[in-house]
Amino acid sequence: MLSKSQIKLYKSLEKKKFRNETLLFVAEGTKTVNEFIENNWEIEALIATEEWAKKYSKKSINKLIITHYEEIQKLSFQKTPQEVIAIIRQKEYKKINPLNKLGIALDNIQDSGNVGTIIRTALWFGLDYLFFGNGTADIFSPKVVQASMGAIAKIAFNKGDLASFLSSSDTNTTIYGTFMEGDNVFQTKLKQNGILIMGNEGNGISPTIERFINKRLYIPPFPN
C-alpha cells in the first residue's frame, strides 16, 4: 500500500514545478509503462494491482508496490485508469548533433496531446530526434507521455532555444517548415540531413524561426 506522503508526492507530478524539483514523472497503462521498462529507464515506483503484477511484472520488481485498483484510480490522471502507474526518473537531455540526421523541432506547440502525437508519429516514421523549443509543452507532462504511448522512451530529444539550435546546425542542413502553402509533404522526399519545424497551433511558425527555413512544406488535410 502507498503512504500518504507517497500519494501526495505522486499526485504533485501533474505540475511542472514539482516534476522539475523531483526529476520524476508519471506514466500510465501497460503499453506505455512497459516501453519505459524495456528501454531501461529508471523506475522509482511501479504501482499496480496484484492481477497486473502476475501478468506483466518482469523488471523493476524491487520497486513494485501492490495496491487496490481504487487507489490507482485516486492517483491516476486518466478518465479511465488502467491497472498500473509508474513513477519514472527523468533522463538528462543530451546534446543533439543534427548532422546527417533527420529530426523534428517544435516551435511553441502548447497542446500536450498534439505534442505527444507528434512524438509517436516521429518514431513511427523513423526520425532520429526531437527538439522542443521554448514554450512547447513539457515532454514529461502526464498528457504528453500518454499521448505519445511511450514513444518518448525510444527517441532522442532535447529542449532549449530553437533559434540557437538552428544557428548551430550545419550550413548544408535543409530546414523545412510547415505552412498553409508549400510543397506537399507527402510528395516531397526529405533529405537525410534535415530539420522539420512545426509551429504553434494558432500562430504557426514564429518570424524569428521562419528566417532559418529554406524549404516550405504543406501538410494537406485527409484525404487529399
Image (cartoon, rainbow, N blue to C red):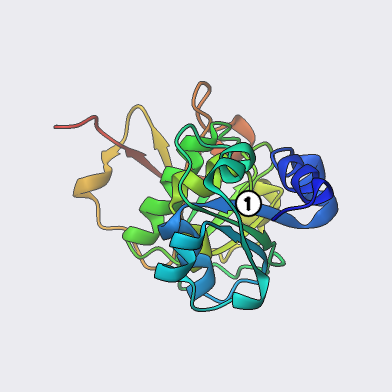
Residue 164 on image: x %, y %: 70, 52
> Residue at point 65% right, 44% down?
138
Work out which quarter of the rendered image holds the N terminus and state it: bottom right
Depth check: give the residue in front, 76 or 195: 76
> Residue at point 39% right, 69% down?
55
Residue 104 on image: x %, y %: 48, 53
Say above or below: 211 vs 36. above
Residue 147, image quadrant: top left
Say above or below: 17 vs 27. above
Circle 1 is placed at which residue position? 26
Say above or below: 211 vs 2. above
Q: Is residue 214 visible?
A: no
Circle 1: residue type: Val
Number of on-image labels: 1
Depth check: give the residue in front, 113 or 109: 113
Depth check: give the residue in front, 187 or 27: 27
Q: Is residue 4 visible?
A: yes
> Residue at point 27% right, 40% down?
183
Residue 166 on image: x %, y %: 61, 54
Say above or below: 218 vs 93. above
- Give the structural element (helix, strand or loop) at label 1: strand
Q: Residue furthest top?
A: 202
Residue 220, image quadrant: top left
Work out which quarter of the rendered image holds the C terminus and state it: top left
Question: Label 1: how many residues lie within 10 Å, few (<14), some (14-19) or many (20+)?
Answer: many
153 left or right of 17 in image: left
Residue 122 on image: x %, y %: 40, 55
> Residue at point 75% right, 46% down?
7
